[in-house]
Image (cartoon, rainbow, N blue to C red):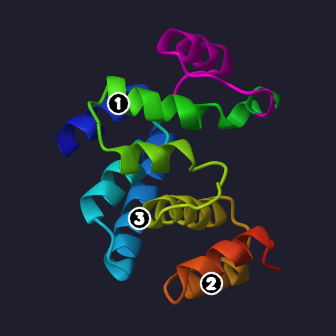
């Protein structure tokens, strides 16, 4: 099943985005192992978190209408996050994912939410680590973030939002 996810993703995402998804997936599995979360769920949410990212914004909006994904005014004003709720729907309809925990983690991977589950935090922070490395935001920041990440997930989440300097 997981190999099917990878094959389909390769055909829908750019090579750069696909490699990014693999990185998030690998980081998510490491964190799941560290914090006692379900590694298979972490793997699936990590690999599929950007499954809707291969579509341009207009296509994403059309697909939201097709699948009944309701976009609020805030999401419409910040179009780069549309792929998150759409991705949860695509993971369900096109990839056959029915696990609510996985779908919720995909849905909130761009914008944190109140009362995040352990899996939500793992996917969100895995993305933060990969983006920090990917965008070359500095070795010090990456080191601080990953150092805290493997000691205290909640503290790392807090520090991420405080914009480590």
Q: Residue at 82% across / 29% down in the picture?
A: 77
Decide: is 66 above or below 106: above
Q: Pointer 1: residues within 10 angstroms few (<14), some, or many (20+)?
A: some
What label sits on residue 92 in the rendered view? 1
Q: Secondary structure at mark 2?
A: helix
Q: Please report whichever mark, 3 or 2, sits nearer to the chain's N-terminal start.
A: 3
Distance Cα–Cα, label 1 vs label 3: 20 Å
Decide: is 30 above or below 48: below
Q: Residue at 56% across / 59% down in the picture?
A: 124
Magenta span has 138? no
Q: Which residues are magenta?
A: 53-74
What label sits on residue 143 in the rendered view? 2
Distance Cα–Cα, label 1 vs label 2: 35 Å
Does residue 13 appear in this view? no
Q: Nearer the viewer, residue 40 or 137?
A: 40
Q: Quadrant of the C terminus?
A: bottom right
What label sits on residue 28 in the rendered view? 3
Q: Nearer the viewer, residue 2 or 105?
A: 105
For the residues carrying marks 1 and 3, which lies nearer the camera in this image? 1
Q: Please report whichever mark, 1 or 2, sits nearer to the chain's N-terminal start.
A: 1
Judged left or right of residue 12, residue 63 is right
What label sits on residue 35 in the rendered view? none
Judged left or right of residue 96, residue 91 is right
Q: Residue at 38% across / 48% down in the picture?
A: 102
Residue 141's x, y, as percent? 71, 79
Which residue is outermost to the front? 115
Distance Cα–Cα, label 3 vs label 2: 17 Å
């Amino acid at each position: 099943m997981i190999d099917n996810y990878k094959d389909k993703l390769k055909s829908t995402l750019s090579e750069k985005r696909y490699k990014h998804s693999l990185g998030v997936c690998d980081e998510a599995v490491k964190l799941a192992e560290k914090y006692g979360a379900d590694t298979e769920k972490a793997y699936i949410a990590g690999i599929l978190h950007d499954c809707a990212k291969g579509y341009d914004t207009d296509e994403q909006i059309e697909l939201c209408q097709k699948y009944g994904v309701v976009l609020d005014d805030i999401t419409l004003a910040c179009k780069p996050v549309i792929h998150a709720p759409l991705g949860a729907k695509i993971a369900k309809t096109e990839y056959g994912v029915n696990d609510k925990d996985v779908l919720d983690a995909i849905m909130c991977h761009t914008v944190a939410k109140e009362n995040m589950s352990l899996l939500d935090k793992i996917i969100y922070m895995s993305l933060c680590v990969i983006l920090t490395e990917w965008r070359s935001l500095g070795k010090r920041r990456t080191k601080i973030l990953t150092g805290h990440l493997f000691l205290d997930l909640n503290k790392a989440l807090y520090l991420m939002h405080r914009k480590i300097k």
